[in-house]
Image (cartoon, rainbow, N blue to C red):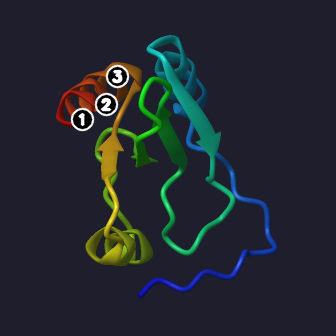
Amino acid sequence: MIHSNFTRHRRKPDANQAEVVAALRAAGYAVLDLHRVGEGVPDLLVADERTGHQVLVEIKQDGEFLNVREKEFFQTWPGQKRIVFDAQDAVDKLSDWRKTI
């Protein structure tokens, strides 16, 4: 089970987060920024505005990998999760996810 304590230091969003968020919103998703939560929790909570179904999205730069806490979260959290690398990747992966809900 994942336990989370909000961290007290400021976390910076990924450099490509603003473009990913803008692209997802333009594609009809509601987006909540979670990047400051820490403890391995993904950067975004994204919901399909038509159905309300939700997916957690971790944003990475090309060549980056999940850290230890992120891996633990991805392995143990039962909900939907995706890793994206840029705006187009986010729209494509969430479009594929949307087809399954």
Could you say whether the residue bearing mark 2 is in a helix, strand or loop? helix
Nearer the observer: mark 3 or 1; the answer is 1
Query: Mark 2 and mark 3: span between their CA atoms?
Result: 5 Å
Residue at 32% x, 71% y is 71
- Which residue is the site of mark 1? 97
The three-letter amino acid code for the residue at tag 1 is Trp
Nearest the eye: 1 or 17: 1
Vertically, is 75 above or below 101? Answer: below
Label 2 crowd bin: few (<14), some (14–19), many (20+), radius 10 Å: many
Q: Quadrant of the C terminus?
A: top left
**The N terminus is located in which quarter?**
bottom left
Are the residues at dot 2 and dot 3 in contact (C-beta closer than 8 Å)?
Answer: yes
Mark with earlier residue (3, 1): 3
Residue 91 is tagged as 3
Q: Are marks 1 and 2 in contact (CB under 8 Å)?
A: yes
Residue 6 versus residue 86 in the image, above or below: below
Left or right: where 5 falls relative to 98? right
Disc 1 packing (10 Å; few <14; some 14–19; many ≥20): some
> Badge 3 local density, few (<14 within 10 Å), some, or many (20+)?
many
**Residue denoted by label 2:** 94
Q: Amino acid at mark 2?
A: Leu
Mark 1 to mark 2: distance in Å? Answer: 5 Å
